[in-house]
Image (cartoon, grey):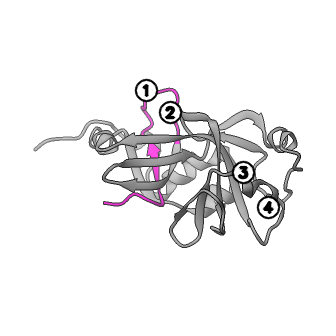
Amino acid sequence: MDLTNHFLIAMPDMQDNFFADSVVYVCSYSAEGCMGVIINKPSPLPLRQILSAQQHTEPQHLFDDYIFLGGPVQVDRGFVLHSPAGNWMSSIVIGNNLALTSSGDILPHLHDEQSVKQAMLFMGYTGWSAGQLERELAENSWLTVPASEHIMFGMPHEQRYQAAMSLLNIAPEQLIRTGGHA
């Protein structure tokens, strides 16, 4: 099982406040663990504030005006999920078209639609150690579905949880956490 380029959708009864109603985009998955970013939890920090501090103006072609809370790990570190992958100092290439970049050399290029067609900015990421995510999946904490770039880059963050659920043709109110045993 490789969950790279998949969504992890929090079950509706998720008790962890940080992850409740979250959609996590999985950037990297291996036997050593998993890394992803939450695509539907904006921070109170406007994108223009960070970019102006870096002396860059806000790119007009980016869909969201927010920096997202990528997760509880390294919340002081920024990440850019973008396409095309390009050639940046520190990137994880995801599939054929996406990359997660943690180096600042991408920031001046966010204005150039030839270099970066679509992007989301994050502070922090979500990580699981070896076997941890598998345990959470077995406990029915998450649903999985192949990711949709349209959901990530083409719709408002408020709609992403419901849109990800709709990929499974499931209404959240139909879900129960415990499984039956015959």
Q: CA distance from mark 1 to mark 3?
A: 35 Å
- The residue wearing badge 1 is 15
Q: CA distance from mark 3 to mark 2?
A: 30 Å
Q: CA distance from mark 1 to mark 2?
A: 7 Å
Q: CA distance from mark 4 to mark 3?
A: 10 Å
- The residue wearing badge 2 is 20
Residue 84 relative to residue 163: left or right? right
Residue at the image position 80 percent from the left and 40 percent from the top: 50
Q: CA distance from mark 2 to mark 4?
A: 33 Å
- The residue wearing badge 3 is 104
Image: magenta residue range: 1-22
Residue 105 position in % (x across, y down)? 73, 56
**Element on which disc 1 rests:** loop
The kind of secondary structure the magenta stretch mainly shows is: loop
- The residue wearing badge 4 is 109
Residue 56 position in % (x across, y down)? 87, 49
